[in-house]
Amino acid sequence: MQKPVDVSIVIPLLNEELSLLYLNNWIFKVFKSHSYSFELIFIDDGSTDQSWEIIKKLSFENKSVKGIRFRKNFGKSQALHAGFKIATGKYVITLDADLQDSPEEIPELIVNLNEGGYDLISGWKKKRFDSIIFKNLPSKLFNWAARRVSGIKLNDFNCGIKIYRNEVIKNIDVYGEMHRYIPLLAAQKGFDKIGEKIVQHQARKFGHTKFGTDRFFKGFLDLITLWYINKFGKRPMYFFGLWGSLMLFFGFSFTLYLGIDKLFFDVQARLITSRPEFYIALTLMILGSQFFIAGFLGEIILRTKENKKRYIIKEETTRK
């Protein structure tokens, strides 16, 4: 059985061959001046450069370095999920591999976590070296929307550097593109003591960002999904049933009105099917029925869902 360590550092990456050796040496330099035992977990999310060869070499040279290689690019959330699954540390740190997160923040994050009694602490890149138009302004808008919807008062949901207690990452399921909302996922599981710390943002030394502008649109849709799951995830019928009932009620009300009007007040006038109220009633009853069916299906799926494999590991490198 693998011996637990004090700190697990989980680093998802895609085509970062130029930064890996530098980052590895930087982390080891930081921990040389501290007594924490640690493991370094690289998750290669389908790189097409020499990233995996470098990870294998680092793992061969030091047993503290571990690597997981996906068969293709499955996304950052899946990479974090794989890293969290094998992490043994009492504290789990996430870093981006592009050298924009400083490993020198780690010791202070551990101290802050313990002193504040937090379940997790998220970094806040208050001063950024990114493009104002294409990154900073969209990021501010995104974080504002995330705060309003989630109720969690963080300034930077998408910061790569975060620290968690082990029980937090073992009890959350990071899927889809939900890596942006790990604090919200944790809060939904009862780990709601969430802190924030200003961290230093480094200018990118090598390569270019792997995320396009569509990440903000995807992030907004994911935020709506999380809001719905938080509100109605355990009982989807509460949402669909409510709206379905309202639609059916108004649909039947229109139908009743048309019937009474035709029988007693408008006997010789137009056909019911020529009146706009008829189509409003028909549309409402059809939509109401569909909402009820969606609610029933949601309840059934919720009770029969199984954990499905969301990524395929091609290789692992772990020295015993």
Image (cartoon, rainbow, N blue to C red):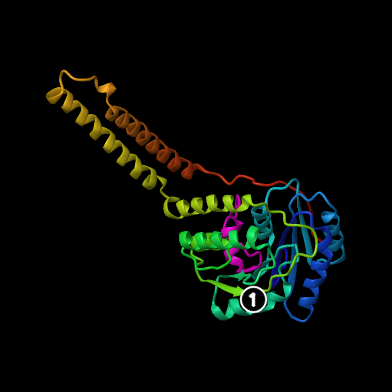
- Outermost residue to the left: 264
Q: Residue at x 46, y 55 (%)?
A: 230
Please state the horizontal and vertical placement of residue 187, each as a whole percent of the image.
50, 63
Q: Is residue 320 visible?
A: no
Q: 242 or 42: which is nearer to us?
A: 242
Q: Is residue 191 left or right of 257 when viewed as pictured? A: right
Q: Is residue 159 left or right of 293 when viewed as pictured? A: right
Please state the horizontal and vertical placement of residue 106, each as a whole percent of the image.
69, 74
Residue 248 on the magenta segment: no
Please state the horizontal and vertical placement of residue 162, each as a whole percent of the image.
63, 68
Q: Residue at x 82, y 54 (%)?
A: 52
- Helix, strand or loop for disc 1: helix
Type of amino acid under label 1: Leu
Q: Residue at x 16, y 27 (%)?
A: 261
Q: Which residues are magenta?
A: 158-181
Q: Quadrant of residue 286?
A: top left
Q: Which residue is mark 1?
A: 109
Q: Is residue 140 left or right of 232 when viewed as pictured? A: right
Q: Residue at x 51, y 66 (%)?
A: 191
Q: How many numbered marks, from 0 up? A: 1
* Image quadrant occupied by the C terminus: bottom right
Please state the horizontal and vertical placement of residue 105, each as a whole percent of the image.
69, 75
